[in-house]
């Protein structure tokens, strides 16, 4: 059976993060800083570990720390509308990023294709990037 009290190092290890990540979340007020005990150590409880895991999972789906702070303050029984709106907003951002990445992919593919087709004494990619326009060949 696992102990329900963790030092910062063990808390970080259990959550799969570094100690500095725990401290960063404390500075950002996502995690509370427990008071020091008589031996000078701070001990974290199982609830803090679960909160830390929640933060990491929320980040993994692309939520910003400000969004996560807001989610942590919601009542789970009444939060569905708010969390859905937040997820839909994040989804819209991801969709836009995918469009931007597709355009970037197409531009890079065109440059590579041009290089493969033309080659020559000057690099077509460098020529395009420098803004030079080639006249006739």
Image (spheres, rainbow, N blue to C red):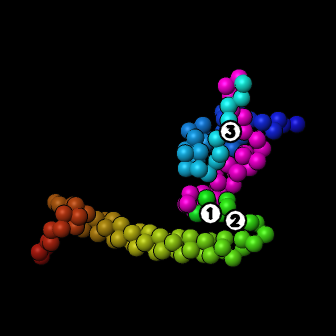
**Pointer 1 and pointer 3: residues touching (CB < 8 Å)?**
no
- Would residue 119 be visible to someone looking at this image? no
Residue at disc 3, secondary structure: loop
Please name the residue that numbered disc 1 is placed on.
Answer: 70
Which quadrant of the figure contains the C terminus?
Answer: bottom left
In the rendered image, which residue does mark 2 sit on? Answer: 74
Residue extent of the magenta highlight: 39-66
**CA neighbours of label 1 inside 10 A, class few (<14), some (14 to 19), many (20+):** few
Across and down, in percent, residue 11 comes to: 70, 38
Residue 35, which numbered label? Answer: none
Q: CA distance from mark 3 to mark 2?
A: 22 Å
Q: Is residue 101 visible?
A: yes
Q: Secondary structure at mark 2?
A: loop
Q: Are marks 1 and 2 in contact (CB under 8 Å)?
A: yes
Instruction: State how far apart marks 1 and 3 are (Cα).
Output: 21 Å
Mark 3, residue position: 34
Q: Is residue 56 magenta?
A: yes
* Residue visible at 68% across and 28% down in the picture: 41
Horizontal side of residue 66 vs 117, given as left or right: right
Q: Nearer the viewer, residue 90 or 115?
A: 90
Structural crowding at the residue carrying mark 2, measured as other residues with C-alpha within 10 Å and reported as few (<14), some (14–19) or many (≥20): few
């Amino acid at each position: 059976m696992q102990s329900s009290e963790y030092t910062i190092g063990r808390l970080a290890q259990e959550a799969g993060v570094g100690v500095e990540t725990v401290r960063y979340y404390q500075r950002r007020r996502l995690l509370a800083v427990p008071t020091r005990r008589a031996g000078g150590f701070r001990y974290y409880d199982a609830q803090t570990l679960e909160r830390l895991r929640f933060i990491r999972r929320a980040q993994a789906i692309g939520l910003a720390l400000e969004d996560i702070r807001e989610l942590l303050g919601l009542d789970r029984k009444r939060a569905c509308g708010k969390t859905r709106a937040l997820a839909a907003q994040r989804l819209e951002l991801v969709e836009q990023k995918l469009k931007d990445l597709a355009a970037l992919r197409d531009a890079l593919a065109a440059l590579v294709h041009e290089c493969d087709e033309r080659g020559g004494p000057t690099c077509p990619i460098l020529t395009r990037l420098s803004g030079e326009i080639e006249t006739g060949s």
